């Protein structure tokens, strides 16, 4: 009889642990996976766009973005999450060039949006002037 109680307790503990791990895995999956297309971690490939970022340059505490093609707007953020189409970070591009003040010792991520609404992959620039793709 004592052996039967021990087996029931062990079974209960194992099933409880499996249930807790299953719930934990589901919660993690829900928080890590994109919820819909606009929250996706994937971005359109630059080759779909005629607009390109030609150069990023930091000088005297200002970031200068030079582009080519029909660029409508640019977005500069300190996080690499893709901005939504109507995000507040989007600023109008004038004559394929834009300049903005930045903070030193930070990393910035830069996107452009063409006139068709396509958003580029980001380029990264450190405030020391090093550009990364």
Image (cartoon, rainbow, N blue to C red):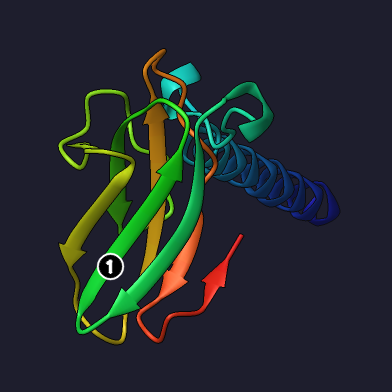
Residue 60 picture quarter: bottom left
Q: Which residue is mark 1?
A: 63
92 or 30: nearer the viewer: 92
How many tags in the picture? Answer: 1
> Can residue 93 be seen from the camera position used here?
yes
Q: Is residue 19 left or right of residue 97?
A: right
Residue at x-position 53% and y-position 70%: 131
8 or 36: nearer the viewer: 36
Q: Is residue 66 above or below residue 22?
A: below
Q: Quadrant of the C terminus?
A: bottom right
**Image location (x, y in percent) of residue 69:** 47, 30
Instruction: Judge the density around disc 1: few (<14), some (14-19), many (≥20) Cα neighbours within 10 Å.
Output: many
Q: Is residue 43 above or below residue 1?
A: above
**Image location (x, y in percent) of residue 94:** 21, 38
Local SS, label 1: strand
2 or 25: nearer the viewer: 25
């Amino acid at each position: 009889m004592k052996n039967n109680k021990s087996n029931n307790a062990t079974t209960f503990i194992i099933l409880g642990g499996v249930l807790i791990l299953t719930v934990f895995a589901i919660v993690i999956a829900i928080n890590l996976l994109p919820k819909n297309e606009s929250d996706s971690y994937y971005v359109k490939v630059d080759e779909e766009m005629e607009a390109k970022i030609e150069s990023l340059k930091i000088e005297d505490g200002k970031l200068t973005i030079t582009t080519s093609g029909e660029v409508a707007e640019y977005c500069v953020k300190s996080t690499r999450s893709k901005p939504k189409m109507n995000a507040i970070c989007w600023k109008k591009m004038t004559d394929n060039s834009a300049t903005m003040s930045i903070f030193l010792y930070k990393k910035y991520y830069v996107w452009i949006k063409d006139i068709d609404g396509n958003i580029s992959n980001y380029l990264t620039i450190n405030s020391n002037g090093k550009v990364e793709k």
